[in-house]
Image (spheres, rainbow, N blue to C red):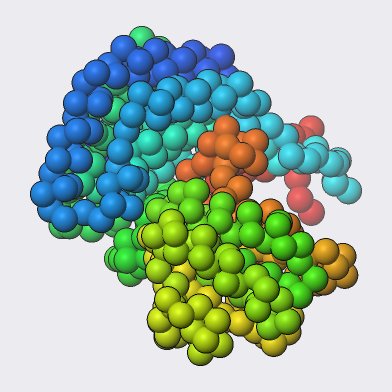
């Protein structure tokens, strides 16, 4: 049995235990993990500093280093997230619906765990805790495969997680980390159909496409966020300005940050110079069409590739559009179906936008930065699904469940 197969076998056995545990037992395990994270905070931060130093030496960008960084506040955020998830209703064995058919059979549809969930992710070590907590609360076991740039941090975090689980009824093997970052092992993991029920890649477009190409285990596609803000001719200037700056600057390295700005032509002359000046002052590179370059001398000419790119950095692609239809056509062409927003005071236009844009999260007069499981009230998220099968948008507890039909009879046989 190979290293990966052994992890899978242990996870499968653990999943059978976890799916039968009470809500209280799972909540106690989450609290034990929270306590262990605080107790081992010094070791976790030291491991993270080693990852950061390696990252600096290997030329990681400022944005990637920011995603990698842990602080006492971020560890406290992990702990708070664990406790929020523990406070949520248990999704398992919840009855979605029930009815009696013409044969007198009582049929009900009940929530059940997915089983063993595999997570493949990059950079952000907080995902290690979020994924573990959500999977456990939903009755699953999880196998984690983080990026090599965060290996030391993830090992320290999983050591704390497993120390917490050792004090609970949840087997420590319900949360496991692949500690060998080789691509060969990653491929073996993606094809571990005998043990892994579902794979969730969380990271940049390159990672997600690699998983989709190589995996034989079912995949839930998440994360690539080429997010748009459309400033309509009837926009409120201050709202548009604040939403743009928040969407681009508050945390540029995350998937719900803005990458494309569209502005109606009749609004552009009064909006773009001031708005882009604020972005430029913050270090953002402006890429735009010919009309944008005329209005913003610091801008450089954008290509179709720029409009299609999730930068995750201090860059934004800007286009001046003639009307609503041109804006929607641009979003349909370049959006990854993650989060797209409009700023407008016109109710009819807002409602059309909500209907016309087929993304997981569609906003009117609000920042795309709100696309987040914790913000939506899910306690956290495993990722933001940009597909339509099984789960869509921020993936909370219910997205980590499936269902089964329970049929109760009194001796019926089919004629």
Above or below, 330 relative to 83: below
Q: Is residue 208 left or right of residue 51?
A: right
Q: Position of residue 67 (x, y in %)?
A: 34, 45
Q: Please determine whether, in this image, residue 149 is positioned above or below residue 406.
A: below
At horizontal 53% and vertical 67% (from top left) the residue drawn is: 276
Tell me what residue is drawn at x 42 percent, y 48 percent.
197
Work out whether 159 lies above or below 131.
Answer: above
Q: In the rendered view of the protein, which quadrant contains the C terminus? A: bottom right
Seen at 25% across and 56% down, the residue is: 61
Nearest to the observer: residue 178 or residue 355: 355
Query: Which image quadrant for residue 285?
Result: bottom left
Residue 11 location, x and y as percent? 33, 34
In this picture, residue 117 sits left or right of residue 378 = left
The answer to whether residue 59 shows anywhere in this view is yes
Q: Is residue 112 left or right of residue 134?
A: right
Residue 393 in sight in this render: no
Which residue is most to the top?
167
The x, y position of residue 355, in whole percent, is 77, 69
Residue 119 percent coordinates (x, y): 37, 46
Q: Is residue 128 left or right of residue 277?
A: left
């Amino acid at each position: 049995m190979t290293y990966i197969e052994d992890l899978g076998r242990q996870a499968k056995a653990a999943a059978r235990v976890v799916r039968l545990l009470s809500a209280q037992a799972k909540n106690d395990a989450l609290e034990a993990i929270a306590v262990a994270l605080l107790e081992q905070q010094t070791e976790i931060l030291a491991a993270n500093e080693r990852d950061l130093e390696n990252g600096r030496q290997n030329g990681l960008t400022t944005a990637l280093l920011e995603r990698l960084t842990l602080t006492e506040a971020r560890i406290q955020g992990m702990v708070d997230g664990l406790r929020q998830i523990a406070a949520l209703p248990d999704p398992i064995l919840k009855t979605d619906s029930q009815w009696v058919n013409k044969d007198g059979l009582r049929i009900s549809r009940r929530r059940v765990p997915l089983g063993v969930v595999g997570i493949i992710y990059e950079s952000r070590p907080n995902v290690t805790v979020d994924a573990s907590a959500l999977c456990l609360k939903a009755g699953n076991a999880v196998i984690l495969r983080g990026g090599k740039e965060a290996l030391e941090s993830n090992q320290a975090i999983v050591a704390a997680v497993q120390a917490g689980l050792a004090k609970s009824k949840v087997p420590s093997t319900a949360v496991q980390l692949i500690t060998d970052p080789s691509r060969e092992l990653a491929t073996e993991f993606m094809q571990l159909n005998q043990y892994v029920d579902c794979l969730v890649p969380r990271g940049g477009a390159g990672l997600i496409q690699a998983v989709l190409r190589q995996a034989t285990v079912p995949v839930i596609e998440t994360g690539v966020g080429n997010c748009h803000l459309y400033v309509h001719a009837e926009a409120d200037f201050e709202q548009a300005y604040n939403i743009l700056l928040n969407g681009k600057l508050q945390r540029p390295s995350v998937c719900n940050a803005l990458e494309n700005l569209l502005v109606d032509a009749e609004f552009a002359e009064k909006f773009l110079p001031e708005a882009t000046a604020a972005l430029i002052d913050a270090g953002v590179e402006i890429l735009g069409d010919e009309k944008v370059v005329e209005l913003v001398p610091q801008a450089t000419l954008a290509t179709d590739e720029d409009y299609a790119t999730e930068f995750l950095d201090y860059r934004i692609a800007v286009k001046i559009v003639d009307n609503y239809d041109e804006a929607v056509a641009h979003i349909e062409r370049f959006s990854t179906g993650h989060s797209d927003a409009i700023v407008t005071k016109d109710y009819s236009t807002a409602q059309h936008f909500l209907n016309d844009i087929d993304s997981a999260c569609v906003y009117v007069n609000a920042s795309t930065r709100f696309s987040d499981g914790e913000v939506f009230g899910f306690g956290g998220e495993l990722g933001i699904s940009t597909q339509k099968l099984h789960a869509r948008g921020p993936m909370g507890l219910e997205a980590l469940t499936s269902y089964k039909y329970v049929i109760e009879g009194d001796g019926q046989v089919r004629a």
